[in-house]
Amino acid sequence: MGIPHPAFPHDWPEDMHPMGWIFLHPPSDVNGSPGIGFEKDQINGLAKFVFDDLGAKLHVVEPRTYQLAISVGITGDDHPIGQLYEHIVDGADRTAVKIASGSLPPGVKLVGDRIVGTPMQSGIWLVDIHVGPLVHYQPPLNGGPLGTYNRGRWVSINTELEYPDPELTKEMRDALRAKLDELDARESEEGETP
């Protein structure tokens, strides 16, 4: 039975370790190329070791993005230059956090679950903060079972998941045949020369 997690919102076989989906086709390079494939026993063994024996935890945190405005300056309403700035990113102690490189004021950085530092330049920075899984699992689109030779892939959490086309019913096949017959007839008429 499946477990609800934004990184793997799919059913998971009951005979597999409940956290085994984490080891499905991890990318082998920064481009996400599939290069590693574990068999069922390997997935179960890895999941048992990492989660049961080592005690690793995977928190369920729904992905969200929000914008933080950091205003640094010398007016009374701005954060003063040269004084410690701190913002606690809610949920960052339990999941991944992503901030675009270069979007924080000089002297300020993400450390653990906090944006902290001493801003050294005045200005206004609009910082997009993503909290939660950065990827989710895209199953293979042929509708077949997951396996070494039927790979899914991990995609950005911002990529909408695709699903296989549903099986064609008799009514759908009949409608498709009728359209194809209509198209064949039209092409046949257009192809005739007087």
Image (cartoon, rainbow, N blue to C red):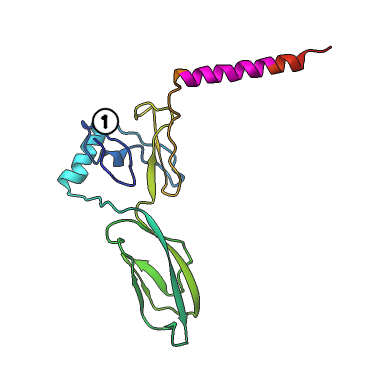
Q: Residues within 10 Å of mark 1 (few under 14, many from 20)?
A: some
Q: In the structure shown, which secondary structural element does the residue marked by tag 1 occupy?
A: helix
Question: Is 137 positioned to the left or the right of 18 in the image?
Answer: right
Q: Which residues are magenta?
A: 171-185
The x, y position of residue 74, in whole percent, is 47, 87
123 shown above or below 143? below
Which of 26/3 is in front? 3
Residue 98 at x, y percent in the picture: 40, 59
Magenta part mainly helix, strand or loop? helix
Please tell me which residue lies in front, 35 or 142: 142
Rendered residue at 49%/21% (across/down) = 172
Q: Residue at x 43, y 24 (%)?
A: 167
Task: In this rendered view, identify the residue nearer to me: 74 or 32.
Answer: 74
Q: Residue furthest left?
A: 53
Asked if residue 66 is among those painted magenta in the image, a careful observer would answer: no
Work out whether 157 lies above or below 167: below
Image-based side of 19 in relation to 33, left or right: left
Q: Give yes or no for residue 174 being in the magenta stretch.
A: yes
Q: Quadrant of residue 12?
A: top left
Residue at x-position 56% and y-position 16%:
177
Q: Is residue 176 above or below residue 108?
A: above
Q: Position of residue 44 (x, y in %)?
A: 22, 35
> Which residue, given by chain and number where applicable, does mark 1 sit on?
40
Q: How many marks?
A: 1
- Which quadrant does the C terminus fall into? top right
Q: Position of residue 180 (x, y in %)?
A: 60, 18
